[in-house]
Amino acid sequence: MNDEAKRLFFALDCPPAQRKAIAQWRGELGLRTGKPVPADNFHLTLLFLGAVPLAQINEVCEAAGNVRKPGEPLRIALDRLQVWHRAGVLSLAPEQAPQALLRLVYALEQAMLPFGLEETAREFRPHLTLARDYRAPEPESATPPEFFLRAERFALFESHKGRYRIVQEWSLI
């Protein structure tokens, strides 16, 4: 990617106290494979945009600001540990995704269509990535995952050299 574009995605941020609790729980799994995602990078991706030309970022933000909001905070249970073998990802996911979350993602997808940013349509699977390059069966957990991600805002993030930075945020209320 050149200096004329930024690698962007929409996501729900994970509050610091929750990051710490999830990282501690992950530590108790005793993982022997994969690369743990830094707790500072914990988030729930809504829509990956990829390389967005600098000239389009303001328009992308304006379009995101106009999407229909749920009108209340989102509460997503992260109660399922799962391995995506093909992608090599260990993640926490909801057993059941809230309808308000699915509607928000659909609204973002529709708002981003005019920009033609992400050519490959992917099915939305809400998750929080715990480790990448994970090549083992699902680890045993002494305590089942029972985390609730509560979000009052969604954000546009920039991914740069393994770090995530919020570019802009919008209220869900």
Image (spheres, grey):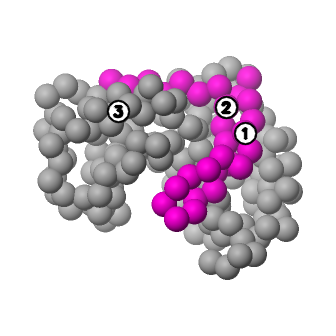
Q: CA distance from mark 3 to mark 2?
A: 20 Å
Near-viewer residue (71 or 22): 22
Looking at numbered disc 2 in the image, what kind of residue is underneath it? Arg
Mark toward the start of the polypeptide (1 vs 3): 3
Task: Give the secondary structure at mark 2.
Answer: strand
Is disc 1 in contact with disc 2, using a CB cutoff of under 8 Å?
yes
Residue 122 on the magenta span: no
Splitting the image into 4 quarters, where does residue 81 fall? Answer: top left
Look at the numbered disc 3 and give the secondary structure of its residue.
helix
Q: Tell me residue 152's x, y (percent).
A: 65, 26
At x 66%, y 46%, the residue is 166
How many other residues sit within 10 Å of disc 2, few (<14), some (14-19) or many (≥20)? some
Q: Is residue 53 visible?
A: yes
Give the amino acid at mark 3: Ile
On screen, residue 109 versus residue 151, left or right, reads: right
> The C terminus appears in which quarter of the rendering?
top right
Q: Bounds of the magenta span?
A: 146-173
The residue where tag 2 is placed is: 153
* Lower position in the chain sequence, tag 1 or tag 2: 2
State the CA–CA distance, disc 1 to disc 2: 6 Å
Q: In the rendered view of the protein, which quadrant contains the N terminus?
A: bottom right
What is the three-letter code of the residue carrying label 1? Glu
Judged from the image, the secondary structure of the residue bearing numbered disc 1 is strand
Residue linked to disc 3: 22
Q: Main secondary structure of the magenta part?
A: strand
On the image, numbered disc 1 is attached to which residue?
169
Q: Nearer the viewer, mark 3 or mark 2?
A: 3
Residue 79 visible in rendering: no
Residue 140 position in % (x across, y down): 13, 38
